[in-house]
Image (tube, rainbow, N blue to C red):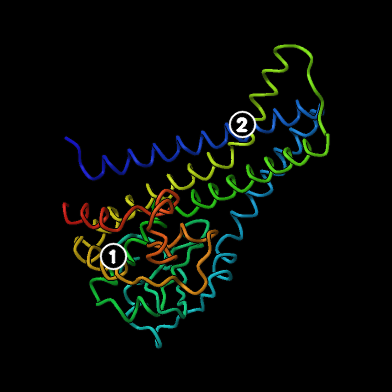
Amino acid sequence: MATLYTNQSSNIRKTWFLMTIFFVLVIALGWFLSYYLADPNILYIFVVFSIFMNVGSYWFSDKIVIKMTGAKPASREEHFNFYTAVENLSITAGLPMPKIYVINDPAPNAFATGRDKKHAAVAVTTGLLQALDKTELEGVIAHELSHIGNRDMLLSTVAVVLAGFVSIISNIFLRSRLMGGGRDRDSKAGAIIMIAGIVLLILAPIFAMLIRLSISRKREFLADASGALLTRYPEGLAKALEKIGKYGAPMARASDATAHLFISNPFGAKSMRGLHRLFLTHPPVEERIKILRGM
């Protein structure tokens, strides 16, 4: 019989599968670029550069994100309810107490970041603290702690880095073609490889973005489920998502680079219209609420 834990395991397996596709895509791009430019050393440079990017994002992701969002450290005295909610739920979840931050922004939102459980941070906006009651705030905090416990932050960071890396390589190749770089192949097999490689490099950034969005959406469903288990009160998070979803204005420092980290889309109601829905980093709030209340 399927259970909530069964769905969690399934989502984790699917996410790792998508990450494997990412790595295969990166290797394929590196091989083709070295083939096209007739220089095997390019593949080695490609691999070293990708490792460097991943290591850098792993060690400094939390500091970079905190800086980008303008979050400031929160004290127990100034934000007592927020501090105690994080402290109590961390104990319940068996997690170290993460660093906590507040973003001065009226839009209700929150995110978690960091490379692992011992180097994690949770940030909320002033709008969230003002809009939610105790059980709703606990639902949001439990959601963010679930991201920490499930190691979602590391997966999201790697996905973003790889997506950006694929785009960079594609741009380098297209620029080299425009400048007459590379070499042509006379054989039929060589011509086929060239055509396939060119198509791959043109479409790769699109595939990378779609995979990143897919991973981010799956992570939100999993964190909702895990957070509901942590508080034993799914309605708290459901009500919080209702209030967050009703706020139409975007965050002041909304960014594509960090949008996937927040509990809700930081770009406001306009981003939910038309074709923009295809590129959202979050599943629709209505769908998340329906699943929570079905628990």
- The residue that mark 2 highlights is 200
Tag nearer the camera, 2 or 1:
2
What is the CA distance from the residue labelled 2 to the residue labelled 1?
39 Å
Secondary structure category for the residue under label 2: helix
Q: Quadrant of residue 292?
A: bottom left
Decide: few, some or many residues near mark 2? Use Cα within 10 Å; few <14, some 14-19, many ≥20.
some
- The residue that mark 1 highlights is 241
The percent coordinates of residue 91 (x first, y second) are 33, 66
Q: Amino acid at mark 1?
A: Leu
In this rendering, position of residue 294 left or right of residue 276: left
Decide: few, some or many residues near mark 1? Use Cα within 10 Å; few <14, some 14-19, many ≥20.
many
- Compare residues 253 and 240 and report the one nearer the observer: 253
Of the two numbered discs 2 and 1 on the same chain, state the one appearing first in sequence.
2
In this view, the residue farthest toward the bottom is: 77
In this view, the residue farthest toward the front is: 274
The image shows a total of numbered marks equal to 2
In this rendering, position of residue 256 left or right of residue 220: right
Q: Residue at x 40, y 72 (%)?
A: 249
Of the 4 image quadrants, the one containing the N terminus is top left
